[in-house]
Amino acid sequence: MPNAKDNPEAFFRSIENMAKELSMSKDTINKCIDYLTVPPDDIPALLVKKEVGSIQKDVNKPPRNVPNIYVLNKEGYKQEIEWAMNKMLEVYGVEEFCPMKSGNYRFTS
């Protein structure tokens, strides 16, 4: 595509948004994504999953995770992931992503 850099084929939607839009439970969405990203036996997975991390736009608020990136497992998928990462940086208005936040976050001043 001529403007693939600006409109990557990769997608990055939160599990919560996908569940709402598809009228499915988050558990079902997670199972489907696992099915599509984990290769069975000798067959390559249909999708490649890239965990992105978190953002913290306000130092007075805890960081929050951003959605993972999913892209078709085909030639050029690494470039698609890079373009999607750049698009997400633009969308979230940050210069970089922080490590993935896990568990309960305790804010300390």
Image: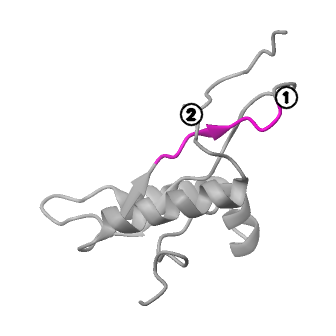
Q: Residue 101 in the image: x percent, y percent?
A: 62, 30
Q: Which residue is mark 2?
A: 100
Residue 8 — which label? Answer: none
Count the marks: 2
Quarter containing the C terminus: top right
Residue 61 — which label? Answer: 1
Residue 97 position by quadrant: top right
In the picture as drawn, the residue positioned furthest to the top comes out as 109
Amino acid residing under circle 2: Met
Q: CA distance from mark 1 to mark 2?
A: 15 Å
Residue 73 position by quadrant: bottom left
Q: Earlier in the sequence, mark 1 or mark 2?
A: 1
Q: Residue at x 54, y 53 (%)?
A: 68
Residue 23 position by quadrant: bottom right
Dominant SS of magenta comes to: loop
Q: Residue at x 53, y 59 (%)?
A: 86
In the picture as drawn, the residue positioned furthest to the bottom comes out as 2
**Magenta segment:** 51-58
Amino acid residing under circle 1: Lys
